[in-house]
Image: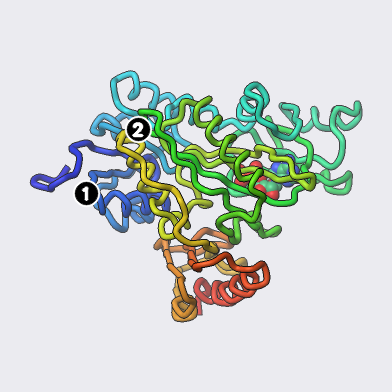
């Protein structure tokens, strides 16, 4: 902590990961005069652009986390690919580690996640766990696996990497190596995400579910509508599911739960992330208290802020152009600013790569857009997006 800096709370908060989520955690924390530091590979990463409290190191490395964590009182994450053993040691040494290393460990393995859902009575698509591609060929032969199916690497996948949808024999070349989950393909009507926040005292805040609309090619979130257009009953059921999940996990911090609504209206758990989430960026402007502030309140055991929405919103991810890799050049800013209610966030990554998350825009509107209106707005933003990231 810098000498003489006035703080709301004399606690040093250490965040593992210094990307855009870290940057937005810092932004929320700075309004509350919190002392937040980051550990990640390069201080050129987004969080490093706005604070000097940035230690260069590897969040997957045991020693780096121990050295960083020793100087902290409270430790949290912006990404789950961290060394869990180090976090367990820090927790045993008396540090507040939220979410717990046990939750992070569970989330790191998609196979363990699936078992957790099954064991605790959460609907998830039927699955089996396999160790190798040979097991898959064998399963297809003996009938324990049938088309279409979805294959997910147990570890290390993110943003669609590590997921293969295999619709038939002609797509068998897409199969991934290594231990994985094989699950039934869901007939998806809508992809929904719900965010739940819980503090150490057990107080819970649940954000209204949002609908995520994906780009087939990039497999990355393209745009999102908040709140999701779902029935009142579905809304209530999803709130209950989020509450139950947070309590079963004894969560402290944030948890994003990704769900499928199938064509029959069933609510099916897909996967979770125990940290701020892309599907909650809109909460900064569209809700009374955003996800980043509520994460900080939760891990400091402060009362949580109200998660209710102030205004419906559309969130569009600004992704790196599919055919350009190189220095980031921003243009087309005026078109975005011309959209009424648009809030532009640029992450400050030096290099743009195909489909890389470079920023987002949250567009607020006092009423729900009709499906027709929202399509029109999204089209207008999309027209602008590529221009932002093209090197002109
Ligand atoms: P990631 O961790 O990379 O985001 P996900 O588990 O969210 O991986 O899968 C990426 C996408 O693949 C999902 O958003 C969904 O569109 C599709 N998908 C995943 N599992 C299934 C499934 N069982 N049935 C149908 N589509 C699926």
Which of the 4 quarters of the picture holds residue 183? Answer: top right
Q: Position of residue 374 (x, y in %)?
A: 62, 69
Query: Residue at the spot x=26%, y=52% of the render?
Result: 30
Place of residue 120 in the rendered image (x, y in percent of width and height, measured from the top left): 62, 23
CA separation in Å, label 2 and label 1: 24 Å
Above or below, 41 relative to 309: above
Dot 2 and dot 1 residues touching (CB under 8 Å): no
Closer to the N terminus: mark 2 or mark 1? 1
Q: Does any portion of residue 49 appear in the rendered image?
A: yes
In this rendering, the label closer to the viewer, 2 or 1: 1
Judged from the image, the quadrant occupied by ligand 1 is: top right
Please name whichever residue, 52 or 57, is drawn nearer the observer in this view of the structure: 52
Taking the spot 46% from the left edge, 71% from the top edge, the residue there is: 342
Front residue of 50/184: it is 184
> For mark 2, what is the residue?
65
* The residue at label 1 has a CB less than 8 Å from ligand 1: no
Position of 179 relative to 152 (above/below): above
Q: Residue at x 39, y 48 (%)?
A: 292
x, y percentage for residue 351? 46, 63
Horizontal arrangement in the rendering, residue 389 relative to residue 300 (left or right): right
In terms of depth relative to the viewer, which is nearer, 357 or 338?
Answer: 338
Relative to residue 100, is residue 192 depicted above or below? Answer: below
The residue positioned 33% from the left and 24% from the top of the image is 90
- Label 2 beta carbon less than 8 Å to ligand 1: no
How many marks on residues? 2
Q: Quadrant of the N terminus?
A: top left
Q: Nearer the viewer, residue 153 or 305?
A: 305
Density class for disc 1 (Cα within 10 Å; few <14, some 14-19, many ≥20) is: some
Name the residue beneath numbered marker 1. 33
């Amino acid at each position: 902590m810098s000498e003489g800096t006035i703080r709301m709370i004399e606690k040093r908060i250490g965040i593992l990961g210094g990307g855009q989520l870290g940057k937005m955690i810092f932004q929320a924390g700075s309004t509350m005069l919190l002392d937040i530091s980051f550990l990640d590979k390069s201080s050129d990463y987004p969080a490093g652009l706005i604070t000097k409290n940035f230690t260069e190191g590897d969040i997957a490395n045991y020693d780096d986390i121990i050295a960083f964590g020793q100087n902290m009182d409270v430790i949290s994450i912006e990404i789950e690919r961290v060394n869990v053993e180090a976090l367990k040691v820090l927790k045993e040494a008396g540090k507040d580690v939220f979410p717990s290393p046990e939750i992070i460990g569970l989330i790191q393995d998609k196979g363990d996640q699936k078992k957790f859902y099954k064991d605790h009575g959460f609907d998830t698509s039927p699955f089996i766990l396999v160790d190798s591609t040979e097991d898959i060929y064998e399963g297809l032969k003996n009938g324990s696996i049938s088309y279409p199916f979805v294959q997910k690497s147990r570890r290390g996948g993110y943003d669609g990497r590590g997921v293969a949808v295999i619709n038939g024999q002609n797509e068998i070349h897409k199969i991934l190596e290594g231990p994985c989950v094989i699950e039934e393909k869901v007939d998806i009507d809508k992809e929904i995400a719900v965010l739940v926040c819980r503090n150490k005292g057990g107080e819970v805040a649940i954000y209204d579910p949002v609908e995520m609309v994906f780009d087939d090619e990039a497999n990355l979130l393209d745009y999102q509508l908040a709140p999701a257009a779902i029935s009142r009953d579905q809304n209530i059921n999803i709130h209950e599911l989020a509450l139950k999940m947070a309590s079963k996990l004894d969560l402290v911090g944030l948890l994003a739960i990704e769900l499928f609504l199938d064509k029959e209206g069933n609510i099916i758990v897909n996967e979770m992330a125990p940290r701020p989430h892309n599907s909650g960026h809109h909460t900064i402007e569209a809700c009374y208290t955003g996800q980043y502030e509520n994460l900080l309140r939760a891990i400091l055991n402060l009362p949580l802020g109200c998660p209710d929405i102030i205004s419906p919103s559309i969130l569009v991810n600004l992704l790196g152009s599919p055919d350009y890799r190189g220095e980031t050049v921003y243009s087309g800013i005026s078109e975005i600013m011309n959209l009424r209610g648009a809030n532009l966030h640029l992450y400050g990554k030096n290099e743009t790569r195909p489909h890389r998350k470079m920023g987002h825009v949250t567009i607020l509107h006092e009423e729900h857009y009709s499906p027709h209106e929202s399509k029109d707005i999204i089209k207008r933003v999309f027209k602008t997006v590529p221009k932002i990231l093209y090197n002109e």
